[in-house]
């Protein structure tokens, strides 16, 4: 089943995109900051969410990991 039809997989993919974009922006800030329109703009927004809401994103990652390990 693809991640589009399974809600838990969709949330997992979304959290991974947010964490990956925030990590890549910390390594290459000029890469993310110059394009703020289109797909790269969406990735820039994901990086901003990962930076500003990092305690909430971290808690969500931990809860998702626990739910995958113990309830799936």
Image (spheres, rainbow, N blue to C red):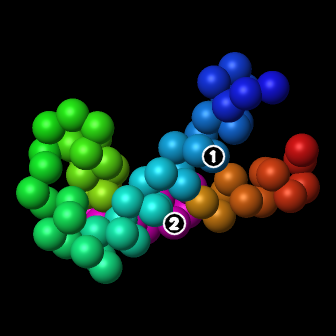
Q: Which residue is mark 1?
A: 12
**Where the N terminus falls, by quadrant?**
top right
Q: Residue at x 25, y 45 (%)?
A: 40
Disc assigned to residue 48: none
Tell whether 29 sits left or right of 46.
left
Helix, strand or loop at label 2? It is helix
Q: Residue at x 13, y 49 (%)?
A: 35
Tell whether 24 sits left or right of 20.
left
Tell me, yes or no, if residue 53 can be seen here.
Answer: no
Q: Nearer the viewer, residue 23 or 62?
A: 23
Residue 57 is a magenta residue = yes
Q: Is residue 41 above or below residue 62?
A: above
Tell me, yes or no, if residue 72 can be seen here.
Answer: yes
Determine which quarter of the picture holds residue 60. Answer: bottom right
Q: Residue at x 69, y 20 (%)?
A: 5
Q: Nearer the viewer, residue 13 or 67?
A: 13
Q: Is residue 3 above or below residue 13?
A: above
User: Which region of the structure is painted magenta?
Assistant: 50-60
Q: Which residue is mark 2?
A: 58
Crowding near the residue tagged with mark 2, few <14, some 14–19, many ≥20 C-alpha atoms within 10 Å = some
Kindly give the residue lying farthest to the bottom in the view shown.
27
Helix, strand or loop at label 1? It is helix
Q: Is residue 4 above or below residue 26?
A: above
Q: Residue 66, percent across and down?
A: 77, 59
As measured in the structure, the alpha-carbon distance from the residue carrying label 2 to the one carrying label 1 is 12 Å
Q: Earlier in the sequence, mark 2 or mark 1?
A: 1
């Amino acid at each position: 089943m693809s991640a589009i039809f399974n809600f838990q997989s969709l949330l997992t993919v979304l959290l991974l995109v947010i964490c990956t974009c925030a990590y890549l922006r910390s390594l290459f800030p000029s890469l993310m900051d110059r394009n703020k329109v289109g797909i790269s703009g969406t990735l820039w927004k994901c990086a901003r969410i990962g930076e500003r809401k990092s305690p909430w994103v971290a808690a969500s990652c931990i809860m998702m990991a626990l739910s995958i390990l113990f309830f799936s």
